[in-house]
Amino acid sequence: MPLPSGKRHFLDFRDLSYAELRHLLIHAERLKKERGTQDAPLAGKKLAMVFEKPSTRTRVSFEVGMYELGGTALYLGKNDIQIGHGESIPDTARVLSRFVDAIMLRCHGHDTLTNLAKYADVPVINGLTDYNHPCQLLADILVFEEHRGPIAAKTVVWVGDGNNMANSWIVAAQRFGFVLHLAVPHALRPCAQTVEWAQENGATIRFFENADDAVKGAHAIVADTWVSMGQSGAEERKALLAPYQVNDALMAKADPKALFLHCLPAHRGEEVTDSVLDGPQSVVFDEAENRLHVQKAVLLWCLGVI
Ligand code: CP
Ligand code: NVA
């Protein structure tokens, strides 16, 4: 989403064309290869990182990414700044825009993110909301293509809760042209409008109640926590999702070369077993590392450098 300054927000894959998303991935790959040899394209630039929820990968990848690009990042937990004490999002956006060159936000409601972007004069980057997590999807597409080549026309299977990551995979399926199977209990299906949007725009999205059927012919199987940050009803969710564990028996039903992806953090023994997470088909730590490379590409793109 362009700003009057010509810089851009990064909130949702739907705001970017396929060519723009591909541009980000090409630069992420380049930044990965050139790591340690780069000059400082963001010298003097400051990123505010506002967190309403905890984080390991998002915080560290943005903070290290800014450092490696020559800039600096400020960690602002919700209770470190006045958002936690009732200062409005528009006022926070206006004030932070006077101090920093970009803002990354991890928050609960997606409308908090869009509101911040509406009132900020600097680029706003989505570091995860209850609705989606587009930075993670860039890392996921990158890891798939590093290991298996172009993702277009491949089959990716989402197994578990229809959560923010599931919504993000649905939008990605439309943009990147892969087939998406969703093995999700009926009560936990992802955002219906997002599915409708993707299908109306040519995506192939298929729902399965049964994970065994969904993984037939899969090139990648993707899992995530059964209880996302801020979600209630943990015990009910775990009971509904128990048949959706990714274990050796399920992996054996997919293509033998199917990759296993997980955005992490994983809850070992719940959505995935140790044997799968630590097994030969798992690429989860390459996937986590890729957060750094894609974050750097997103920062450069938002700030108009690439
Ligand atoms: N995958 C991911 O966003 O991890 P964090 O919650 O640790 O940032
Ligand atoms: N669905 C998870 C993703 C964590 C990166 C959550 O929102 O907690």
Image: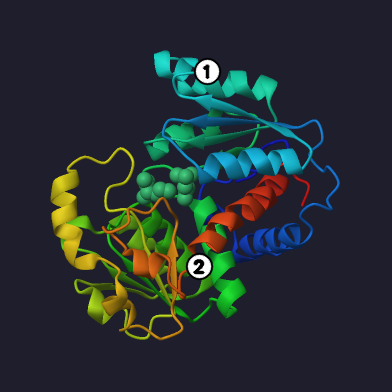
Q: Quadrant of residue 281?
A: bottom left
Is the C-beta of the residue carrying label 2 under 8 Å from the nearest atom of ligand 1? Answer: no
Q: Quadrant of residue 304?
A: top right
**Please, what secondary structure does the residue beneath circle 2 have?**
loop
Q: Which of 72/122 is in front?
A: 72
Instruction: From this view, report whether residue 43 is shown above or below residue 171.
Output: above
Residue 194 at x, y percent in the picture: 36, 58
Q: Amino acid at mark 2?
A: Val
> Quick check: marks 2 and 1 in contact, CB under 8 Å?
no
Please give left or right for residue 243 compared with residue 159 in the image.
Answer: left
Q: Which of 197/254 is in front?
A: 254
The local crowd at label 2, few if under 14, some if 14 to 19, many if 20 or more residues have their Cα within 10 Å, is some
Mark 2 to mark 1: distance in Å? 41 Å
The local crowd at label 1, few if under 14, some if 14 to 19, many if 20 or more residues have their Cα within 10 Å, is some
The residue drawn where x is 23% and y is 66% is 244
Residue identified by numbered label 2: 283
Residue 104 at x, y percent in the picture: 57, 36
Residue identified by numbered label 1: 91
Please give left or right for residue 100 compared with residue 84 in the image.
Answer: right
Residue 56 at x, y percent in the picture: 50, 42
Residue 148 at x, y percent in the picture: 56, 79
Q: Amino acid at mark 1?
A: Asp
The residue drawn where x is 69% and y is 36% is 4
Instruction: From this view, report whether residue 87 is shown above or below residue 232.
Output: above
Q: Nearer the viewer, mark 2 or mark 1?
A: 2
